[in-house]
Amino acid sequence: MNKILYMVVPCYNEEEVLHETAKRLTEKYKSLIQRNLISEKSRVVFVDDGSKDNTWNIICSLHESDPIFSGIKLARNSGHQNAVLAGLMTVRELCDMAITMDADLQDDINAVDEMVQKYHEGYQVVYGVRSARKTDTFFKKFTAESFYKFMKIMGADVVYNHADFRLMSSRVLAELANCREVNLFLRGLVRTLGFKSCNVMYERAERFAGESKYPLKKMLAFALNAITSFSTRPLRLITGAGLFMFVISIFAVIWTICVKLTGNAELGWSSTVCSIWFIGGLQILALGIIGEYIGRIYEEVKQRPRFIIEEFINESDDMEKLSQSSKGL
Ligand code: UDP
Ligand code: MG
């Protein structure tokens, strides 16, 4: 029997691109079904992440015109990572494999063939990796690549230049459901699950229409979340810096005593002022970093639902399979 593929597409104010995305996905699905690579029961699930525009109405009309399209409406804007998770957790019992893809057609739909092929070869996770960033602006390219490099220095295991375009088998999704963390960083999380995985290269295109929903502020929050969710190295760096300063201070004390004994005590004004600023700055920075981690712990212990599904429209015979697990995980 052919395997069921569910494509999870998070959408936040994407009215300008949805029709085109739907058109291209229909063509892709038709060809995959024709070639017996996926089952006819395969679906595309658009997750409306609390959009303020016409996105949900478009999803509903797409569903009415073609049952291949399903929709999940989140009760509010929960962020890209939570929207992806909401989709995955909802469909995990209905599919054999799921692919997550952005709505704006930046991820190359043609890479889906190879991903599905890899699944049939026995891979449980297939990462879509960007081979080039020709279409990105210098700023986007620089910030994104620095992010991957910085994550590596901070000790988090991520696939270089892999965003959230990836295939996962239902086996992997079942394990993902056991991870209850609120501060989500899916690319790191999926990597920690293990399983047989491989990369598929693709060229990242330009956004088809509309604007990026990831302004600098969201990007920074995302990077901070990624680091604090996956690495305690910053805390260790603070300890290292503290130790270093302690050693320096021993020398400083010896030096102060020497200056005092030679009768030149007033000499130290600039060094005192410099150390006050330096140590003060370092302490505040250290407190800030520790505060970030405490903030994460605070959010984790509250265990609030990571997303709330308001509505799910889907045409499938297996609807009764839909487990409780998807309800606001
Ligand atoms: N997105 C979302 N919720 C948000 C922000 C973005 O679901 O709060 C979706 C968005 O609709 C898109 C994907 O996440 O499908 C990636 O966003 P975008 O293309 O704006 O990011 P960029 O490619 O510029 O990093
Ligand atoms: Mg994009």
Image (cartoon, rainbow, N blue to C red):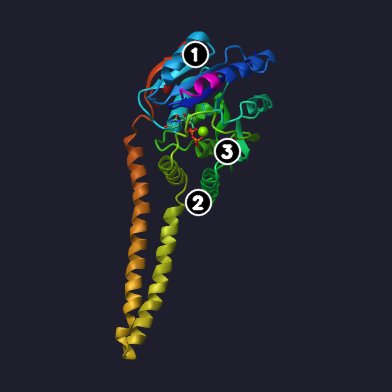
What residue range appears in magenta? Answer: 15-22
Q: Is residue 70 above or below residue 292?
A: above
Which image quadrant for residue 310? top left
Q: CA distance from mark 1 to mark 2?
A: 43 Å
Report the residue marked by disc 3. 162
- Amino acid type of the residue that numbered disc 2 sits on in the rendered structure: Met
Q: CA distance from mark 2 to mark 3?
A: 17 Å
Mark nearer the N terminus (1 vs 2)? 1
Report the residue marked by disc 2. 154
In the image, what residue occupies the spot 35% across and 53% down? 288
Do callouts 1 and 2 mark residues in contact (Cβ within 8 Å)? no
Q: Position of residue 189 (x, y in %)?
A: 50, 37
- Amino acid type of the residue that numbered disc 3 sits on in the rendered structure: His
**Residue 283 falls within the magenta-colored stretch:** no
Q: Quadrant of the C terminus?
A: top left
Which image quadrant for residue 55? top left
- Amino acid type of the residue that numbered disc 1 sits on in the rendered structure: Leu
Question: As drawn, is 8 to the left or to the right of 196?
Answer: left
Q: Is residue 110 above or below residue 239?
A: above
